Amino acid sequence: MTAEVFQGSIFVDAAPEDVFPFFTEAEALATWMGDRAVVEARVGGRFVLYFDDRIVEGRYLAVEFPHRVVITWGRHGSVRLPPGGSTLEVTFAPEGAGTRVTVVHDGLPDLERELHARGWSHYLLRLAAAAGHHVDAHHVPPHLVEGAD
C-alpha cells in the first residue's frame, strides 16, 4: 500500500486571521465541516470532528496563528486510515484582500486519496462560503463517504 498526497487550494474573501479559526475553534469548524467538533488548538491537543456516524480524530502538530496548522488525521474505527494515519497541513497566505488556503493531505493510503479528493473539493467550497457567512446547514453528501471503511 503506497502513501498518496492530496493538495488543493481555494481563495477565501477574508483575512488570514479571520480564516484561521475555521481550523482551530470548534464552533467555526462545525459551520463548514462536520456536525460538531472538539478541538484543543495547541501542539498535542485533540482534534475530533463528527460527521453523521463517522468520526475524524487526530492531534495538532503545529498551530502557528495565522499562517499554518498541521493536524494528524484518521477515522475512528477505520482499518485503512486509523486516527493519526495521515497528516493534514493547512496554510493561510495573504492574497489581495483575502487569503489563499492550501491543504496538503499526506500519507493517505491509495484507496483513500480519491475519497479525500472528493471530500476536500466539497469542503473547501464550504469553507469559502462559511468565511463569507453564506453557508447552508451541513450534511454529508453520500458520494463523499462511498467506499469508506
Image: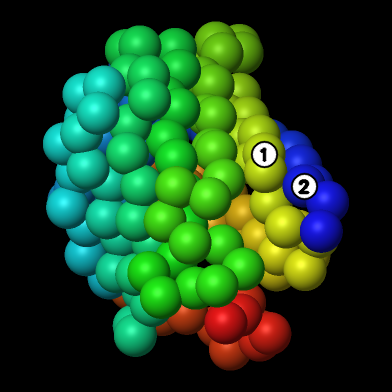
Q: Residues within 10 Å of mark 1 (few under 14, many from 20)?
A: some
Q: Residue at x 52, y 29 (%)?
A: 90
The residue under label 1 is which amino acid type?
Asp
Q: Residue at x 62, y 55 (%)?
A: 120
Tell me if I can see residue 117 in this picture. Answer: no
Element assignment for label 2: strand
Q: Quadrant of residue 86?
A: top right
Q: Residue at x 26, y 22 (%)?
A: 43
Image coordinates for residue 135, horizontal then vertical, percent: 39, 61
Image coordinates for residue 25, horizontal then vertical, percent: 20, 39
Counting the numbered discs, the total is 2
Q: Circle 1 is placed at which residue position? A: 106
Element assignment for label 1: strand
Q: Nearer the viewer, mark 1 or mark 2?
A: 2
Q: Earlier in the sequence, mark 1 or mark 2?
A: 2
Q: Is residue 132 left or right of residue 18?
A: right
Tell me if I can see residue 82 in this picture. Answer: yes
Image coordinates for residue 74, horizontal then vertical, percent: 47, 57
Q: Residue at x 36, y 47 (%)?
A: 58
Q: Circle 2 is placed at which residue position? A: 3
Is the Cβ of the residue at disc 1 closer than 8 Å to that at disc 2? yes
Quadrant of the rendering where the C terminus is positioned: bottom right
Q: Is residue 83 above or below residue 21?
A: below
Q: Is residue 129 above or below residue 144?
A: above
Quadrant of the rendering where the N terminus is positioned: bottom right
Q: Residues within 10 Å of mark 2 (few under 14, many from 20)?
A: few
Image coordinates for residue 148, horizontal then vertical, percent: 61, 80
The residue under label 2 is which amino acid type?
Ala
